[in-house]
Amino acid sequence: MKAYLSEYLGTTFLLMIVVGSGIMGQSLSDNDSITLLANTIATGAGLIVLIWTFGKISGAHFNPAVSVVMFANSELSSRNFILYGLLQVSGAISGTLLANYMFGLDALQVSVNSRSGLNLYISEVVATFGLLLVILRVRTVRSELVAPAVGLYITSAYWFTSSTSFANPAVTIGRMFTDTFTGIDPGNVLFFITAQFLGAFLAFGINKILDKPS
C-alpha cells in the first residue's frame, strides 16, 4: 500500500509541477521562451526531489514507460505493474486538475494544443529512450545518483527535443486535461504514447547489449 500511495502522490505532484509551472510562466510573461525555461527548471528540480522522496518506497517510477521496463526486467510483478500504471494515470489526471484549479481556471479542461507530426513522434521515441537508458545505466554506478541524473536529463531534453520531452504516457494523458501552455490535444495522445513505449523498449534492448560481458 505504501508503494501504491507513493506512485499516486508522486505522479500527482509531478503533474502539478509540470502544468502549474507552465501556467505560472504564461501568467508572468508573454514570451514562450521564458515560459519554457521556467517550466524546464521547475520540472527538473521537482523530479529530483520527488525521486529522492519516494524512491526507497516504490522506486519512484511515476511513469508507465519506466514500469513496463522494470516489469520486462523481472523487477516488478504483473500485479504491481498494472496497479502502478493505473495509479500513475489517475495521479497524473489529479495533478493536472489541481494545477488548473489552483490558478483559478476551470479544473476540468480539454486541450486544443496540437502537437502533431512525425518529427514530434520521433522526438518522443528519442526522449523516452534517453530517459530509460539514463535510469538503467546510472543506477549501476550508484542508485542515489538516479534522481539528479533524471532531473538533469529531462531539463536538457526539454530543449533538445522538438516535443519538449513528455517521455511519459501518464504525463501525456494528464496533460490532455489542461488547455494551457503544457496541454496536448487528445488526438495526438495515442501517437505520443506509442512513441514513448517504443523508446522504452529500445532502451531495454540496448541496455541488455551493454550489460553483456565483453
Image (cartoon, rainbow, N blue to C red):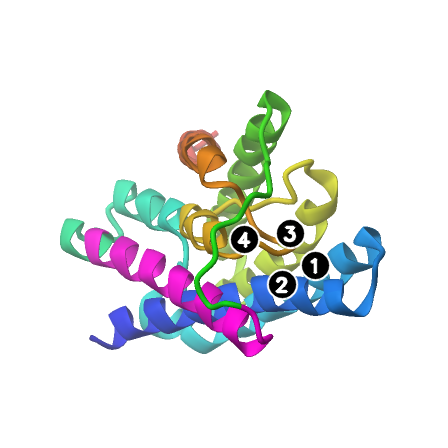
The tag earlier along the polypeptide, 2 or 4, is 2
| Element class at badge 1 | helix
Label 4 and label 3: CA atoms lie apart by 11 Å
- The residue at the point 60 percent across, 68 percent down is 20
61 or 193, nearer to the observer: 193
The label on residue 153 is 3
Residue depicted at 36% across the width and 65% down the height: 91
Q: Which of pointers 2 and 4 indicates the residue nearer the eye?
A: 2
Mark 3 or mark 2, whichever is nearer to me: 2
Amino acid type of the residue tagged 2 in the rendering? Thr
Q: Position of residue 140 (x, y in %)?
A: 48, 53
Q: Earlier in the sequence, mark 4 or mark 3?
A: 4
* Residue kind at label 3, given as amino acid type: Tyr
Please name which of the two marks, 4 or 3, marks the residue nearer to the observer: 3
The residue segment tinted magenta is: 82-105
- In front of the other: label 3 or label 1? 1
- Can residue 200 be seen in the rendering of this structure? no
Tell me if label 1 and label 2 are in contact, CB under 8 Å. yes
Predominant secondary structure in magenta?
A: helix
- Tell me where residue 192 appears, x and y as whole percent: 48, 35
Label drawn at residue 110: none
Q: Nearer the viewer, residue 156 or 94?
A: 94
- Disc 4 + disc 3, Cβ < 8 Å: no
- What residue is disc 1 on? 40
Q: CA distance from mark 3 to mark 2?
A: 11 Å
| Amino acid at dot 4 | Val
As drawn, 8 above or below 156 = below
Judging by the rendered image, the residue that carries numbered circle 2 is 43
Q: Is 24 positioned to the left or the right of 115 in the image?
A: right
Mark 4 or mark 1: name the one nearer the start of the chain. 1
